[in-house]
Image (cartoon, rainbow, N blue to C red):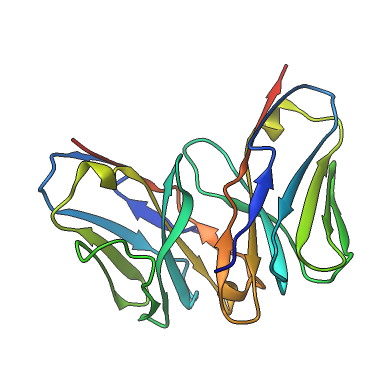
Amino acid sequence: TQLLEQSPQFLSIQEGENLTVYCNSSSVFSSLQWYRQEPGEGPVLLVTVVTGGEVKKLKRLTFQFGDARKDSSLHITAAQTGDTGLYLCAGGDYGQNFVFGPGTRLSVLP
Amino acid sequence: DAGVIQSPRHEVTEMGQEVTLRCKPISGHDYLFWYRQTMMRGLELLIYFNNNVPIDDSGMPEDRFSAKMPNASFSTLKIQPSEPRDSAVYFCASSLGKAIAGNQPQHFGDGTRLSIL
């Protein structure tokens, strides 16, 4: 059974600070996705990474897929209150399995 | 375009009652997923369908849970009888293509918040 771990579990920072959250596994994934979930809503896809070492940028968000395809990171520059939410990583393997991590709950304070 | 539509948004009922959750996926999507989310267990995949056929129901917790997809535009998740430990937010998601391998995004509805008293 594949498992994804995310750290930290909770993170509270001031507006304007930078932060990095992590997604780790002992398994190799064919691709990895990051979702953000706001209160009262379903998760919304932010990015999909498919190549080991791949880096993708989405405005102030930078996503990296580890070279070994077992881990990923999300870096947010100059966090804003609108970045508050639950960040979920989700990995798919070559055998049609798909699993979500437990999430990092981010709170950006004004 | 309309997203995934779930109903009801909130459901409060007494234990022992039957609960039916409904989902309308995005038109044209061929995969449909049911998830349950709690603080303790996070987002858990319960069952998924491909072209209306159940493919993997290994996440369904007990025989009290059942899911159907009678056509491409409608699915239900039923709990009978319901128990307090079933209280959670239940999400439906749909995707086009092999989302289960992570190559396609899953589009989630806004969920049904279920409380069993």
Report the side of A41 relative to A81 (left or right).
left
The count of marks equals 0
On screen, A32 above or below A41? Answer: below
- Is residue B1 among the parts visible in the rendering? no
Report the side of A14 relative to B79 (left or right).
right
Q: Where residue B24 sits: x, y (%)?
A: 37, 63
Q: Residue at x 79, y 47 (%)?
A: A74
Report the side of A41 relative to A86 (left or right).
left
Rendered-image quadrant of the C terminus of chain A: top right
Indicate the quadrant where residue B13 lies: top left
Q: Where residue A71 sits: x, y (%)?
A: 77, 59
Q: Where residue B110 sits: x, y (%)?
A: 45, 47
Report the side of A63 relative to B3 (left or right).
right
Rendered-image quadrant of the N terminus of chain A: bottom right
- Is residue A46 among the parts visible in the rendering? yes
Depth order, front residue of B50/A2: A2
Q: Residue at x 31, y 61 (%)?
A: B61
Residue lying at the far left of the rendered structure: B16
Q: Where residue B3 sits: x, y (%)?
A: 49, 58
Depth order, front residue of B113/A32: A32
Indicate the quadrant where residue A106 lies: top right
Q: Residue at x 65, y 81 (%)?
A: A94
Q: Residue at x 80, y 30 (%)?
A: A79
Indicate the quadrant where residue A29 lies: bottom right
Depth order, front residue of B63/B94: B63
